[in-house]
Image (cartoon, grey):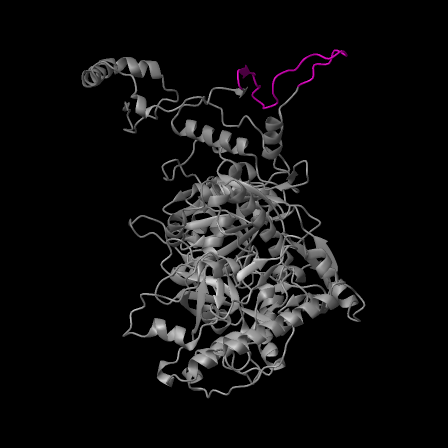
């Protein structure tokens, strides 16, 4: 760069315009010399190698084979034929019309197809990369294209990065009314209800500091099939206290005559799920809060620079630097700047309007009018996600931001014209540069894996999604989400929720897909047909006193099946049987899934069961996991007790780990082992060369499908009864390929697990007792049983209501 000296000795500013041709002419000898050197090396052959060629058909605007059509720049398509009235109508293809419609960023609502299926705001991004599937009324990304592999690479990104999932298909409902009325309503439909929490937890929920999770039931009917797991939260108290109308409404409803009002927030709110070891590092780079709507904000760490003597202490703070210190179930309400206007300098997100150049250095712009005044943008009234009547303004259009950044680059390199400080495109008055968000921390799991949920307005999904993906977040679909749930030990909806109607609908779609693939294979090579979903009604619920008596087992099976037939005949007119039973699927799930310690205690008390699975608790707190940590639990006396007949059965979720070897697939059957089976695997002196197996004919006849489509458990003959083991549950989440933990999730009957623990502790010294329960697992198409150690989830934590 040429420096013109003057009397003051200050170098002159660089030229405002740069002539490229003059610059090239002055460097012509150097360019010719470089060209000659390259020509000698290439033997004057500048053609690209055939194996390194790439298709360059991006310029081709062909829409059909052997047919070309010119398209206008605005995407409206070419002009069509002139009709009889003389009007020039434009016929646009369906693909162009859909792209134009999907690129719009309306404040509320989804784009729907002809059959009413909704499309996410990130549909265009996912449709180019993922396999889409119709589910729950949306086009949802199922997973990456391929054969469903790639879990090993996904787990590496989970432990070394961040995964992001667009969960905007989750519905949102807002209840408005007096606090006592809302608690009464939620207590009748949620299990566990907010009223069951301790006083400290209930206070944190009511003031909006934490959120709660529960299972949603029909009003006053907790025994019927559940609807879905839900997350509930209260509006922060400091926001309600400033609203005079709300305070008057609360005072006027003291007599209890006011009712709660239900408002649907569908099409207004979106949800982005972030999970990984670097979640807060990503939020630290992409979000810059301008206002915290919380009385007790998260811990903030100040960053100061002392590298130079003349440096000024930086006052930039970030609430995400110490995010790992935040307690689980925390809720943070804040207003953040548009993430697209932020520039990362030193790993910190700063505003683009704070005089930061393209290289991350501070500079003083000559034309202050070219930089938008962001502070003035934030002086307007902040939006609020809790106000259902007010719609948050959408963000500034992407084209406007791109034009502004392009002008800033030209100004930095002195390529723009003098006096061109104003942008060509004006900003819409209905757009804004700030967005209110709710950040929910769902907990920290093993290997420092953090899970957070970001609730934002629906019109801001693209802005946050593109920012997260461009900053290193890896997008996942439902298949990858299931792998993550199996890796960290969380239940996955709906596969781990057979008591919900969504489970039967999902399994019906999976069964149709499996049958369609099987029809494409010749009959001689088709795999063995297995029940989808697993036949939960074939479970044996009461084994009697001894599991080792084959005759007793067979009698119990027959008695249990007879009771089931009688129950089905008496309840044939129920609405549940009418709505859920189909000709080609098994009967609905009959039973309850205990996901809290209180539910299990009530169940075992009703059947007069022993307390080896879940000890009897006397006191205010029902914390089973605290009792299981006590070493004296292993020293309890064994008291055999006869269990009463109970209806319906109770299931608990367990985590299965192979004792020595074995891979447990989804749908595998969990069986009750005998004492000899456990000794066969656990004996250190004996080698298990021939594990317990059944014949191939027994595999094909273990579950038989009747002409009506129902799968039934078949009792084997006397000669095959010795290798027959009774089912007590099924695997709902199989092993994840590439995982070092090698754990699977299953649902097993609670009283049978308690009986198995009694049988396994009876003749074992106290020092050799284990809290895990030995079970046998056999894949549906396999002949070999594998020994596994089952860990009850509720023995490790108080509730099992979190879900992925």
Q: Position of residue 633 (x, y in %)?
A: 44, 83
Our reading of the magenta stretch's main secondary structure is loop
Question: Which region shows up in magenta?
Answer: 65-90
Q: Position of residue 322 (x, y in %)?
A: 42, 59
Q: Position of residue 182 (x, y in %)?
A: 70, 65
**Residue 73: in magenta span:** yes
Q: Position of residue 752 (x, y in %)?
A: 53, 75
Instruction: Note whether 106 is above or below 47 in the view shown.
Output: below
Instruction: Note whether 568 is above or below 509 in the view shown.
Output: below
Q: Does residue 160 appear anywhere in the picture?
A: yes
Res. 686 image quadrant: bottom left
**Front one among 637 and 128:** 637
The N terminus appears in which quarter of the rendering?
top left
- At 55% from the left and 60% from the top, the residue drawn is 703
**Residue 599: in magenta span:** no
Instruction: Note whether 361 is above or below 444 in the view shown.
Output: above
Q: Does residue 436 appear anywhere in the picture?
A: no
Q: Is residue 195 left or right of residue 30?
A: right
**Front one among 594 and 236:** 594
Q: Is residue 171 left or right of residue 800?
A: right
Instruction: Note whether 715 is above or below 55 in the view shown.
Output: below
């Amino acid at each position: 760069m040429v420096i013109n000296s003057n009397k003051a000795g200050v170098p002159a500013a660089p030229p405002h315009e740069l002539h490229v041709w003059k610059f090239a002419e002055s460097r012509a000898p150097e360019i010719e010399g470089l060209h000659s050197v390259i020509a000698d090396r290439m033997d004057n052959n500048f053609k690209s190698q055939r194996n390194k060629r790439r298709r360059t058909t991006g310029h081709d605007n062909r829409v059909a084979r052997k047919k070309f059509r010119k398209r206008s720049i605005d995407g409206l398509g070419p002009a069509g034929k002139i009709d009889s009235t003389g009007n020039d109508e434009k016929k646009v293809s369906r693909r162009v019309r859909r792209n134009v419609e999907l690129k719009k960023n309306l404040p509320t609502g989804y784009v729907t197809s002809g059959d009413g299926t909704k499309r996410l705001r990130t549909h265009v991004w996912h449709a180019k990369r993922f396999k889409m599937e119709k589910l729950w009324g949306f086009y949802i990304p199922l997973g990456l294209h391929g054969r469903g592999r790639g879990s090993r690479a996904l787990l590496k990104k989970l432990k070394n990065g961040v995964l992001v999932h667009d969960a905007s298909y989750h519905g949102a409902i807002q209840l408005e009314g007096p606090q006592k009325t809302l608690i009464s309503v939620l207590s009748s439909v949620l299990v566990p209800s907010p009223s069951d929490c301790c006083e400290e937890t209930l206070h944190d929920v009511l003031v909006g500091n934490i959120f709660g999770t529960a299972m949603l039931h029909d009003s006053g009917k907790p025994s019927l099939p559940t609807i879905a797991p839900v997350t509930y939260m209260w509006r922060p108290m400091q926001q309600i206290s400033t609203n005079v109308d709300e305070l008057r409404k609360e005072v006027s409803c003291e007599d209890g005559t006011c009712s709660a009002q239900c408002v649907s927030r569908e099409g207004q709110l979106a949800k982005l799920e972030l999970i990984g070891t670097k979640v807060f590092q990503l939020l630290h780079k992409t979000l810059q809060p301008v206002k915290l709507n919380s009385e007790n904000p998260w811990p903030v760490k100040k960053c100061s620079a002392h590298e130079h003597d003349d440096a000024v202490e930086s006052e930039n703070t970030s609430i995400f630097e110490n995010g790992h210190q935040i307690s689980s179930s925390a809720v943070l309400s804040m207003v953040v700047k548009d993430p697209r206007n932020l520039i990362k300098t030193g790993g910190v997100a700063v505003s683009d309007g704070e005089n930061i150049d393209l290289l991350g250095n501070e500079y003083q712009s000559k034309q202050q009018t070219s930089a938008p005044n962001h502070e003035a943008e934030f002086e307007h009234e902040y939006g609020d996600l809790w106000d259902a009547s007010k719609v948050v303004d959408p963000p500034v259009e992407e084209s406007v931001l791109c034009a502004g950044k392009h002008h800033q680059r030209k100004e930095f390199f002195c390529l723009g014209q003098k006096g061109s400080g104003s942008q060509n495109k004006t900003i819409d008055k209905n757009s804004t540069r700030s967005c209110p968000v709710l950040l929910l921390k769902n907990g920290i799991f093993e290997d420092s894996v953090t899970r957070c949920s970001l609730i934002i307005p629906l019109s801001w999904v693209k802005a946050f999604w593109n920012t997260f993906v461009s900053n290193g977040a890896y997008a996942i679909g439902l298949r990858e989400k299931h792998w993550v749930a199996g890796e960290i030990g969380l239940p996955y909806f709906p596969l781990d929720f057979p008591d919900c109607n969504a489970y039967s609908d999902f399994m019906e779609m999976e069964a149709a897909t499996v049958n369609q693939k099987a029809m494409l294979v010749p009959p001689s090579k088709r795999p063995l047909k297995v029940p989808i979903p697993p036949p939960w009604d074939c479970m044996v619920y009461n084994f009697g006193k001894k599991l080792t008596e084959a005759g007793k087992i067979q009698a119990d099976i027959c008695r249990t099946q007879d009771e089931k037939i009688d129950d089905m005949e008496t309840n044939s007119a129920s609405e549940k049987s009418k709505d859920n039973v189909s000709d080609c699927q098994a009967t609905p799930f009959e039973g309850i899934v205990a996901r809290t310690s209180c539910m299990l205690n009530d169940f075992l008390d009703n059947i007069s069961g022993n307390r080896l699975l879940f000890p009897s608790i006397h006191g205010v707190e029902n914390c089973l996991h605290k009792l299981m940590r006590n070493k004296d639990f292993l020293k309890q006396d064994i008291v055999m007790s006869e269990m009463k007949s109970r209806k319906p059965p109770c299931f608990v979720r367990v985590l299965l780990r192979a004792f020595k070897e074995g891979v447990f697939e989804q749908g595998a059957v969990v069986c009750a082992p005998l004492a000899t089976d456990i000794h066969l695997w656990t004996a250190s002196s004996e080698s298990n060369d021939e594990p317990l197996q059944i014949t191939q004919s027994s595999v094909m006849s273990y579950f038989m499908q009747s002409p009506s489509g129902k799968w039934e458990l078949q009792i084997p003959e006397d000669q095959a009864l010795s290798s027959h083991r009774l089912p007590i549950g099924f695997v709902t989440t199989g092993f994840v390929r590439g995982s070092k933990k090698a754990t699977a999730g299953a649902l097993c009957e609670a009283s049978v697990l308690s009986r198995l623990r009694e049988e396994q502790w009876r003749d074992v010294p106290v020092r050799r007792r284990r809290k895990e329960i030995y079970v046998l697992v056999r894949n549906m198409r396999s002949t070999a049983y594998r020994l596994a150690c089952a860990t009850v989830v509720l023995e490790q934590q108080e509730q099992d209501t979190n879900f992925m």
